[in-house]
Amino acid sequence: MTTYGFLGLGIMGGPMAANLVRAGFDVTVWNRNPAKCAPLVALGARQASSPAEVCAACDITIAMLADPAAAREVCFGANGVLEGIGGGRGYIDMSTVDDETSTAIGAAVTARGGRFLEAPVSGTKKPAEDGTLIILAAGDQSLFTDAGPAFAALGKKCLHLGEVGQGARMKLVVNMIMGQMMTALGEGMALGRNCGLDGGQLLEVLDAGAMANPMFKGKGQMLLSGEFPTSFPLKHMQKDLRLAVELGDRLGQPLHGAATANESFKRARAAGHADEDFAAVFRVLE
Amino acid sequence: MTTYGFLGLGIMGGPMAANLVRAGFDVTVWNRNPAKCAPLVALGARQASSPAEVCAACDITIAMLADPAAAREVCFGANGVLEGIGGGRGYIDMSTVDDETSTAIGAAVTARGGRFLEAPVSGTKKPAEDGTLIILAAGDQSLFTDAGPAFAALGKKCLHLGEVGQGARMKLVVNMIMGQMMTALGEGMALGRNCGLDGGQLLEVLDAGAMANPMFKGKGQMLLSGEFPTSFPLKHMQKDLRLAVELGDRLGQPLHGAATANESFKRARAAGHADEDFAAVFRVLE
Amino acid sequence: MTTYGFLGLGIMGGPMAANLVRAGFDVTVWNRNPAKCAPLVALGARQASSPAEVCAACDITIAMLADPAAAREVCFGANGVLEGIGGGRGYIDMSTVDDETSTAIGAAVTARGGRFLEAPVSGTKKPAEDGTLIILAAGDQSLFTDAGPAFAALGKKCLHLGEVGQGARMKLVVNMIMGQMMTALGEGMALGRNCGLDGGQLLEVLDAGAMANPMFKGKGQMLLSGEFPTSFPLKHMQKDLRLAVELGDRLGQPLHGAATANESFKRARAAGHADEDFAAVFRVLE
Amino acid sequence: MTTYGFLGLGIMGGPMAANLVRAGFDVTVWNRNPAKCAPLVALGARQASSPAEVCAACDITIAMLADPAAAREVCFGANGVLEGIGGGRGYIDMSTVDDETSTAIGAAVTARGGRFLEAPVSGTKKPAEDGTLIILAAGDQSLFTDAGPAFAALGKKCLHLGEVGQGARMKLVVNMIMGQMMTALGEGMALGRNCGLDGGQLLEVLDAGAMANPMFKGKGQMLLSGEFPTSFPLKHMQKDLRLAVELGDRLGQPLHGAATANESFKRARAAGHADEDFAAVFRVLE
């Protein structure tokens, strides 16, 4: 039976690793702060003392780390992934990182004789717990096939998008659309309120028609209440818009709408809403 | 039992009147070209020879006309609504018209002793046939209550939005959001394709996440196929964006995103896509 | 010798009429508030009691009125221009009005047997006093020729732009460019200051290079001082941007830059700067 | 008497070095392709065989190189500036480079005991020949003072802007304004032409008023003729707009106008106008 390693047991990684254990896989975990391993061990996981040890022991090692810096450190650092990977064993980085980081990690893993997939996810805490993430995988096709049963335990949808880097790019494109949808909703609510329409009724109309979507429902409530508890921080959305616009620049793709949304998010960031939910862009639209 | 009149038996009005007849209401119809009355009469409707005759004979008369010019002609013209309305009878204009037209018609009907509701709908041919329109009513509250059973046969959702004019404004706000969502999807598809992502996979990812909505599904297929059979003409979407931006102007509400989308739709209109579906804005984004 | 009438002796009209008198022309003046005629009479002008009387007595009557409403009133009102014009006598409206107003006045004057020119000006109080206005004339070519000596006393430059309406359109295009130049300067000053550059030095660099222009010099000082004494009110600039964008809409000309500037001016208007100089758009850019 | 070195004798550097020699300074030149030294030697300059040799021999060495890569190579490469600089001698880099390159070179020069100024210029071939450049210096104040007489021979205006990096930033801000002015002129010409105005008359009106500037005059002729011989390539303008927008991003400064202009220039780049003059943005505005 395929054995799995799991690196990073934070808000996302913890429940994901637990889902693997509960689904009956043989899982070895590691976390920078080892205290977070206890609940997983209680569920039946083994514990290892370094990424290298995990990668050397397991057929496939999955990582879910906080950011590109953490992803690089766990891979390239002392007792890191590169010191344990090899012999055709697999490494799947599910962290949200830029395409350069993915490509650098992938090249190093491959050079050591390992197989590599980047596999960022769409979805946050709740889908991680429910095993309903959307997995945007790219890279080694055979590893994608081998990891299929694990992906099935982690997500409701799993796509192979091509070469390493395409996972990161798909996330950027999706977030770029999301940023524009948010400003569209925000401008609509602002205009509606200004002409005396009821915000709740506007949301009701939207929810009954062809544009109905869970995001409008969730963020719409934030706009009505004027409170923006952070699910996805505004500064991260603005960063993704910036990166998407820059990607368009490299490819010769003008993006008038995304560039305009980006400036509105910048204004919101400058106005002190960087750490609120990205729906707080409404504050500078109204 | 309340008797109903129905003026205008086009693509929308025909199936709507049929739904009323099938639901058991006593319905008298009129259409400029009387030939279109035959199918309704076959279903059990009566036929009248002018809007005035319908309004004089029925408790509540509903109109579904092509545009503001037609709505004005049927109301103010010879043998028009104003010559038959009065005595507290109701007139409900469900055509899509601007708030000035609504207000003018409403004032004239009221001055003649009638009651008035504007009630534009969200939804096109299919929901009209299925009786699943969204009805955006505004105006006389008692008429709104009296017409409740008829609205229930025509739509799945019916809201009272306030004074006459608010129905037209709600439609404008909703369409403004829709225009921006369309450019967001179009820019995302263009960027994705430019960086080698598969358009079908992008739509699949969108459809699996929090932004999933019927419009992306429908218009997404148009973008993939490169064909834009007209459901809602691009020139009408652009007109609505222009009107929304102008409404914002009057109210002192800046709308950077909507103004930018408006310019992209203008570019598409100038490039010869005015009569295609509004998804054809993609042609000038890619 | 050609005799001249002059209607409207406000901030612009007063000095313009004085320049005509000082240049030796035979001038008859009228103003709604007759008290303003006294200084002109002291200079040697005659005074009349109505626009009709002026137009009946003079070969060519020039008007310089506050806005389209005043221009229409003076033309179409009781004892107005139409009651005195005719017999090939000329009427030149130098007020800043929209092309519809110009066209309506022109058609009425022509129908009475008069000749008509619209001739809005570029330039404000100082150039009016100095006789250095830029005159944007359109309409009757023979009247343009006949009025040449008077135009020479009023402006430093005089162009004939075509049919009635082209004067108004030229002004709109010029102001649209000006609005965008103002936001360009404002964004540059804001960015420069944010990265620690000295605003005065930035203006000095601009003034030494290919972009050097009197407007940057004048408005630049306003940005430095943070005070915006009104030369051209922000609300008027925003109105012109709106009209230019709408003109582009009718002609199928997308204007991404102008539409974006328009939204920034709207934001400034909504933020309470409507009556300050249009340079105050800086307040919402910084 | 202060002795001067000059590195880089291209389109800009050649005439600049010649101006120094003609002004009577003792000048030693170097160029990668030594053949270009001959005309300078004919004028009275000495010739050296490497940047290191120049920097070791001269009190102040000026460089005018093609791009950041060349600037780095000449400084950090074999027999480069760093191998000759020291002892309080000065190095002035007048190449157009980003602030990171400037800062890196400045730090290295200072660490070797040299003094450093960045001094990019505003102005192209003609002002370089005429000695009428605008010099945007930043860095060592004493070197700025010592080099004053040389700057006087090279430019008509010379400013000290602060710490190293501020020269590059000032250039970015100035070019950002220029890019927006260009799109403003282009949109104005496009709209004017669309409503039947004469482009030459529009330029005449602009040139007579408060917005009159040499750039509108020069670029305006390009728009009229439809030919765009390259003075400043469109791709470089677009790069500067991108860098300015990114600078705004780092500083929390939204720039709706610049971001919009950037997208228009991107569209022009993608449409094949990258190597034409930046006035060719008109091609995608009309």
Image (cartoon, coloured by chain):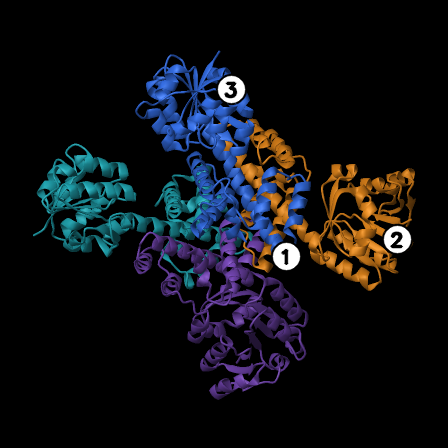
Chain colours: A cyan, B purple, C orange, D blue
Cα distance between the residues tagged 1 and 3: 52 Å
Query: What is the number of the mark on residue C59?
Result: 2
Is the Cβ of the residue at disc 1 closer than 8 Å to that at disc 2? no
Q: How far across and how far down the image is residue D36, in percent? A: 42, 29
Give the tally of numbered discs: 3
Amino acid type, residue under disc 2 in the picture: Asp
Is the Cβ of the residue at disc 3 closer than 8 Å to that at disc 2? no
Q: Looking at the image, which residue is at 53% across and 60% down?
A: B270
Specify the quadrant of the image occupied by residue D117.
top left
Front: mark 1 or 3: 3
Q: How far across and how far down the image is residue C212, in percent? A: 60, 34
Q: Looking at the image, which residue is at 29% across and 50% down?
A: A123
Q: How far across and how far down the image is residue A224, in percent? A: 45, 50
| Circle 2 SS class | loop
Cα distance between the residues tagged 1 and 2: 32 Å
The answer to whether residue C102 is above or below residue A72 is below
Which numbered disc, 1 or 3, marks the residue that appears first in the sequence? 3
Is the Cβ of the residue at disc 1 closer than 8 Å to that at disc 3? no
Amino acid type, residue under disc 1 in the picture: Cys
Residue highlighted by disc 3: D150
Report in which chain the residue with disc 2 lies.
C
Report in which chain the residue with disc 1 lies.
D
Specify the quadrant of the image occupied by residue B213.
bottom left
Q: Residues within 10 Å of mark 2 (few under 14, many from 20)?
A: many
Amino acid type, residue under disc 3 in the picture: Ala
Q: Residues within 10 Å of mark 3 (few under 14, many from 20)?
A: many
Residue that extends furthest to the left in the rendered view of this protein = A1
Q: How far across and how far down the image is residue D3, in percent? A: 45, 15
Q: Are marks 3 and 2 on the same chain?
A: no
Residue highlighted by disc 1: D195
Residue closest to the eye, A5 or D211: D211
Query: What is the number of the mark on residue B262?
Result: none
